[in-house]
Image (cartoon, rainbow, N blue to C red):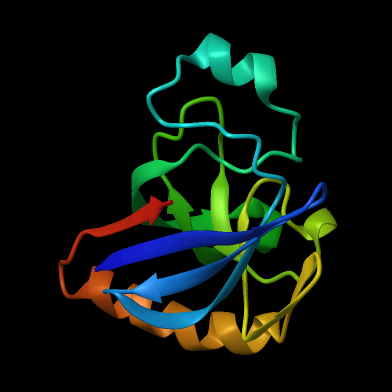
């Protein structure tokens, strides 16, 4: 399974994008502010720019695995692996920049600095994600 986040709307508080599964639009995404980080930057370059919990992860491609999140009562969530300068980047429910902590939030609608109907979007996405893993597929996400 190939996931894509196509970042489209940037403000001082958030980054909104289109979230695609295998090239097909699924819903909208919300992240913290895009500060221009890229996956070819060094850790020291990233640390010089990053603001903790308020910075979108670097553009690039990452593997996504199943993770029982302590932050979400040990619920299984998608987790991005090997994001330089970042840890525990999950895909989970939330509507506002304050909900991200650097993670990716999904929603069926978007507005300035927020996505709406996040539970609906997550409830549509999670079964597809976990079914792909159960079928033995690798899952990757590309941030553009």
The N terminus - image quarter: bottom left
x and y percent of residue 139 in the render?
27, 60
* Residue 58 in the image: above or below residue 102: above
At x 38% / y 24%, what residue is drawn?
A: 40
* Residue 119 in the image: above or below residue 113: below
In the displayed orientation, state which residue is furthest to the left. Answer: 136
At x 73% / y 69%, what residue is drawn?
A: 94
Position of 34 with respect to 54 (left or right) is left
Residue 98 falls in image quadrant:
bottom right
Position of 6 with respect to 138 (left or right) is right
x and y percent of residue 100 in the render?
72, 55
Position of 108 with respect to 42 (left or right) is right
Q: Nearer the viewer, residue 99 or 135?
A: 99
x and y percent of residue 8 in the render?
58, 62
Residue 92 falls in image quadrant:
bottom right
* Residue 97 in the image: above or below residue 23: above
């Amino acid at each position: 399974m190939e996931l894509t986040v196509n970042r489209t709307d940037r403000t001082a508080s958030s980054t909104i994008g289109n979230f695609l599964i295998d090239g097909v639009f699924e819903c909208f995404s919300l992240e913290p502010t895009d500060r221009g980080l890229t996956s070819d930057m060094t850790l020291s370059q990233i640390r010089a720019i990053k603001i903790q919990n308020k910075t979108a992860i670097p553009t690039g491609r990452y593997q996504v695995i199943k993770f029982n999140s302590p932050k979400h009562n040990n619920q299984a969530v998608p987790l991005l692996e090997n994001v330089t300068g970042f840890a525990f980047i999950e895909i989970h429910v939330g509507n506002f920049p304050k909900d991200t902590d650097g993670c990716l939030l999904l929603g069926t609608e978007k507005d300035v600095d927020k996505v709406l109907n996040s539970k609906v979007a997550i409830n549509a996405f999670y079964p597809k994600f976990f079914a792909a893993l159960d079928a033995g597929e690798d899952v990757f996400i590309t941030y553009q």
